[in-house]
Amino acid sequence: TNRVLIQDSTFSNLTSAHIQIGDASSQLGTLKSKVKITSSQFSNFFSDSNSFILANTGADAEISNCSFSNMATLGNGAVLTAGSTKAQVFISDSAFTDKSAG
């Protein structure tokens, strides 16, 4: 399992930057990814196509105690888009303000 932790961080003024989470089994055997994002702030994001967090097939993510503000995309979901198969994203104690999509 490949694990990533983002904690006590601030990300601001992001253009077309993304956190992409998913199962890499088709490329690397059975590599699984688990991402935990906690106590972090994300602001002033814009993309002309994708959400800031892309939870693809096989994604396993936990988001807690985070704030997302001024997030915008011309696509679907300014902050999060989840895949259609076996994507798990758990969100707790987080705030979403001033977001728009599509």
Image (cartoon, rainbow, N blue to C red):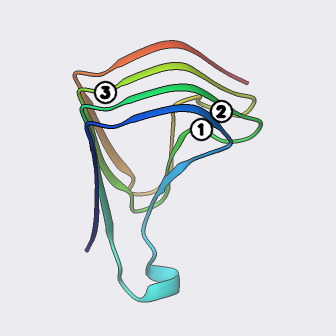
Q: Which label sits on residue 74? A: none
Q: Nearer the viewer, residue 17 or 49?
A: 17
Q: Which residue is mark 3?
A: 66
Q: Is residue 102 left or right of residue 61?
A: right
Is disc 1 placed on a helix, strand or loop?
A: loop
Given residues 15 and 29, the one toward you in this image is: 15
60 to the left or right of 47: left
Q: Position of residue 77 (x, y in %)?
A: 59, 30
Residue type (three-letter) at the residue carrying disc 2 = Asn
Q: Given the image, on which type of amino acid does mark 3 rest?
A: Cys
Foreground: disc 2 or disc 1: 1
Cβ–Cβ under 8 Å for marks 2 and 1: yes
Nearest to N terminus: mark 2 or mark 1: 1
The residue that label 1 is drawn on is: 51
Specify which label sits upstream in the sequence, 1 or 3. Answer: 1
Residue at image position (52%, 84%) is: 27
Image position of 82 (left or right of 86): right
Per the image, the residue denoted by label 2 is 76
Residue 61 as seen in the image, left or right of residue 58: left
Residue at 46% across / 75% down in the picture? Answer: 24
Q: How many angstroms separate mark 3 from mark 2 (CA)?
A: 21 Å
Label 3 secondary element: loop
**Residue 84 is at least partly visible in this image:** no
Along the line of sight, which residue is nearer the eye, 91 or 3? 3
| 56 to 97, vertically: above or below | below
Note whether 53 is above or below 56 in the view shown: above
Quadrant the C terminus occupies: top right
Q: Secondary structure at mark 2?
A: loop
Q: Quadrant of residue 39?
A: top left
